[in-house]
Amino acid sequence: MLPVRTSEEPRAVEPPAMRIRALTRSAAVALVVSWTAADAHAADLAVVATVQPAAMLVRAVGGEQIAVTSLVPPGASPHTFEPRPGDVAALAGAALLVAVGDGLDAWTLRLRDAAGRSPPVLQLLDVPGADPLPAAPGETRGDDRRDPHVWLDPIRVRDALAPALAARLAELDPGDRAGYGERLAAFQTRLTALDDEIRHTLAGHGRAYLPFHDAWRYFAARYGLHAVGVVEESPGAEPTPRELAALVAAARHARVPAILVEPQLSPRLARVLADELGIGLVVADPNGDPRDPARARYEDLMRWNARAFARALGSPAP
């Protein structure tokens, strides 16, 4: 039987507004350095992205003349990330802030206001054609109205996100407008091929999967998959014993061979559930990692995830 756990004593959390003010004070010297660096490297367009996938898309359409910084570092989850003093300096010297929107990175707007020199913001969920899904039930908190993981659908990236990024970069750097158009067209061609490749990778497998975190709804909708449940509806929100029992039953019925876990989140509870089911864990990564060549570029990350899903999908219906 699955063990019953008691919740850990919650730790005191500093109010976001106080944390942002503290970051502003500690980053005063760094701001001066960032302004000097921005003037010295005026030939490069400085863009700050909140998460690694947004930075990947900026690089794909922006080319080498774009200096891209991601606020959430590799290996960290945007759901639990807390800004650092250096992030204020990065925003102060940026020409553009690329955010996802809603609850995933709402902290960025407060951080931008604290930076003093506030760059314009492009929110991916708000671009025409993004067509965001409603937020998953367990992630509806405060500003969380829409599912933020829109980049996990390569067709939405091709038809909405990438064109919006290219257009905004061309506005900021009109001297290379033709270059942004050429890089966008090449990226869109690669994304069309990527979509076909993902479909081929998933062909012949079942459609059911069991994720640790409900990040994959755009990917699932694009490729006809369905989650039999979710281990944690939001990071840190452990299921009840009744919910765990329902997950076990659903996973057995769908014959899923593995639980999809993420490198940014602890697999402890997923491992307990996998042991109960007698199945394995497969790592899928919604965010990517520039330190790993297999997950550093958007197309490579999506191929990596498609292979992970192929290993974790339930058996086809007889």
Image: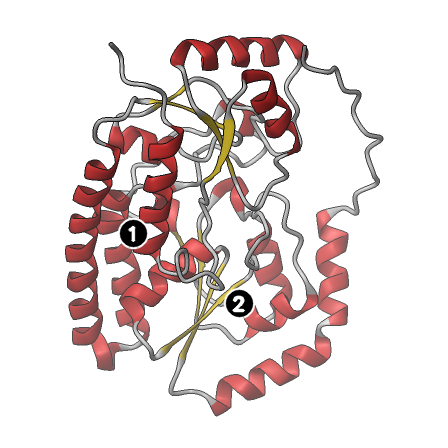
Label 2, residues with CA under 10 Å away: few <14, some 14-19, many ≥20: some
Q: Which of 99 and 221 is in front in this view?
A: 221
Q: Position of residue 34 (x, y in %)?
A: 59, 81
Q: In what quadrant of the picture does the N terminus appear? A: top right
Q: What element carries label 2?
A: loop
Give the total of numbered labels: 2
The residue under the point 19% across, 56% down is 190
Q: What x and y, as percent, mark residue 79?
A: 58, 43
Q: Nearer the viewer, mark 2 or mark 1?
A: 1
Q: Name the residue under label 2.
A: 118
Left or right: where 150 falls relative to 116: left
Amino acid type at circle 1 is: Leu
SS at circle 1: helix
Residue extending farthest bottom: 40
The mark found on residue 117 in the picture is: none
| Residue 315 percent location from the top left of the image | 32, 19
Name of the residue lying farthest toward the front:
278
Which sits in the foreground, 315 or 244?
A: 315
Label 1 crowding class (10 Å Cα cut-off): few <14, some 14-19, many 20+? many
Residue 13 position (above or below residue 236) = below
Query: Upstream in the sequence, badge 2 or badge 1?
Result: 2
Q: Check disc 2 and give the amino acid type.
A: Ser
**Residue matched to label 1:** 161
Residue 267 image offset from top left, x and y in percent: 61, 35
Q: Compare residues 245 and 317 and report the one nearer the observer.
A: 317
235 to 48, vertically: above or below: above
- Rendering quarter of residue 2: top right
Q: In which quarter of the image is residue 165?
A: bottom left
Residue at mark 2 to residue at mark 1: CA–CA distance:
22 Å
